[in-house]
């Protein structure tokens, strides 16, 4: 048996909290990936979920690289300031290319996540189907440490709140989400 890393512990907390929401019927988990890249000695874990009967999807991703792992396992050789994981949150839907609704969505994200977060939006049009895909990303521009593990449940609460607000905005304004 091995001693779990910060990545392992954070993954278990995030996964457990999300499945608790899923079992309670508040969200539906639609995808899960747990990847170990042996060539780069990195790990990533992501879970995608949605509200029941919703067309907006959320994904939480946790990443750890060799430096993060080495800082944990070899604390004498590397500064402990590298021990931890990186997180990225994304929200997906379809159908918006106009600036005004994208600005309104950005305002919703800043209202929930704060102005100090790095929030980006991308719009992709797949040709020849002309399918429009929207991605709203929130990068936590810092290393998440194990001593912040209890904050992860609050982070998931905020993700569910974001899904509710995005779904409400898109439904209220009759955007075609398919």
Image: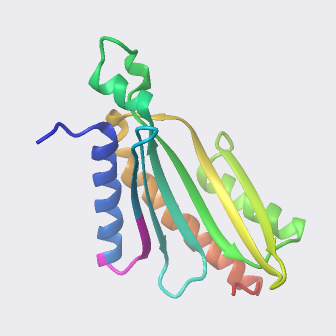
Magenta span: 23-32
| Image spot of residue 43 (x, y percent) | 41, 46
Q: Is residue 29 magenta?
A: yes
* Image quarter of residue 65: top left
- Tally of marks: 0
Q: In the shown orientation, is residue 127 left or right of residue 62?
A: right
Q: Which quadrant of the view contains residue 149?
A: top left
Q: Quadrant of the C terminus?
A: bottom right
Q: Residue at x 34, y 42 (%)?
A: 7
Residue 143 in the image, given as x and y percentages of width and height: 48, 33
In the rendered structure, the answer to whether residue 125 lies left or right of residue 11 reads right
Q: Residue furthest front?
A: 39
* Image quarter of the N terminus: top left
Quarter-of-image position of residue 55: bottom right
Residue 107, given in percent of the width and then of the height, sits at 74, 58
Above or below, 144 relative to 157: above
Seen from the viewer's position, the closer of residues 159 and 3 is 3
**Residue placed most toward the observer, 2 or 12:** 2
Name the image colouring. rainbow
The relative height of residue 120 versus residue 136 in the rendered view (above or below) is above
Q: Residue at x 76, y 87 (%)?
A: 174
Find the residue positioned furthest to the top: 76
**Residue plotted at (29% across, 19% down):** 74
Please state if 72 lies on the left or on the right of 144 as rendered: left
Q: Residue at x 83, y 82 (%)?
A: 130
Q: Position of residue 35 (x, y in %)?
A: 40, 54
Q: Is residue 123 left or right of residue 62?
A: right
Please tell me whether residue 59 is drawn above or below residue 120 in the rendered image. below
């Amino acid at each position: 048996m091995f001693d779990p890393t910060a990545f392992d512990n954070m993954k278990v907390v995030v996964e457990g909290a999300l499945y608790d929401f899923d079992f309670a019927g508040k969200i539906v988990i639609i995808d899960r990936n747990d990847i170990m890249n042996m060539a780069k000695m990195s790990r990533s874990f992501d879970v995608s979920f949605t509200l029941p009967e919703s067309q907006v999807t959320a994904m939480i991703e946790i990443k750890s690289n060799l430096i993060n792992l080495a800082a944990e396992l070899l604390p004498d050789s590397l500064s402990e300031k590298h021990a931890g994981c990186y997180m990225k949150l994304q929200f997906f839907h379809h159908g918006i290319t106009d600036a005004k609704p994208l600005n309104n969505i950005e305002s919703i994200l800043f209202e929930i996540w704060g102005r100090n977060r790095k929030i980006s939006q991308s719009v992709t049009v797949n040709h020849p189907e002309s399918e429009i895909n929207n991605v709203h990303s929130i990068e936590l521009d810092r290393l998440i440490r194990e001593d912040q593990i209890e904050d992860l449940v609050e982070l998931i609460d905020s993700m569910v709140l974001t899904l509710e607000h995005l779904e409400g905005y898109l439904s209220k304004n009759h955007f075609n989400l398919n």
